[in-house]
Image: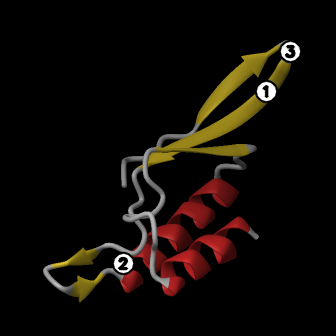
Amino acid sequence: MTCIIPFTLFLHGTIMRILHTSDWHLGQNFYSKSRAAEHQAFLDWLLDTAQSQQVDAIIVAGDIFDTGSPPSYARELYNRFCR
């Protein structure tokens, strides 16, 4: 996860607020300990930040999931966030 700084893009006279983030690695464990609560807190914070900053688009670069076959709770976190 990275520091997220909303910025304003002026494109053909239109203002668009974009938020960029990367490398969430949902589903990752830390020394055999699940990071599910940490990931949920991050996604809650990200959504709150996007809403409070009136962001128009979120760009996610890097790895969303930690593995090619993430655990079901990680996929659920992501699906809930996207709704």
Quarter containing the C terminus: bottom right
32 or 37: which is nearer to us? 32
Disc 3: CA contacts within 10 A as few (<14), some (14-19) or many (>=20)? few
Horizontal and vertical percent for residue 11?
78, 17
Total numbered labels: 3
Looking at this rendering, what residue extends furthest in the front direction?
69
Instruction: Provide the secondary structure element on which disc 2 rests.
Output: helix
Residue 70 lies, with reference to residue 9, above or below; the image says below
- Left or right: residue 70 compared with residue 34: right
Tell me the amino acid under the disc marked 3: Gly
- Left or right: residue 48 compared with residue 33: right
Residue under label 1, please give it. 15
Residue under label 3, please give it. 13
Residue 34's tag is none
Residue under label 2, please give it. 38
Disc 2: CA contacts within 10 A as few (<14), some (14-19) or many (>=20)? few
Tell me the amino acid under the disc marked 2: Glu
Residue 9 lies, with reference to residue 38, above or below; the image says above
Looking at this rendering, what residue extends furthest in the left direction?
31
Horizontal and vertical percent for residue 46?
54, 61
Horizontal and vertical percent for residue 3?
38, 47
Horizontal and vertical percent for residue 22?
44, 47
Quadrant housing residue 68: bottom left
* Contact flag, marks 2 and 3 (Cβ < 8 Å): no
58 or 24: which is nearer to us? 24
Disc 1: CA contacts within 10 A as few (<14), some (14-19) or many (>=20)? few
Of circles 2 and 1, the one toward us is 2
Residue in view at x 38 percent, y 62 percent: 25
* Contact flag, marks 2 and 1 (Cβ < 8 Å): no
Tell me the amino acid under the disc marked 1: Ile
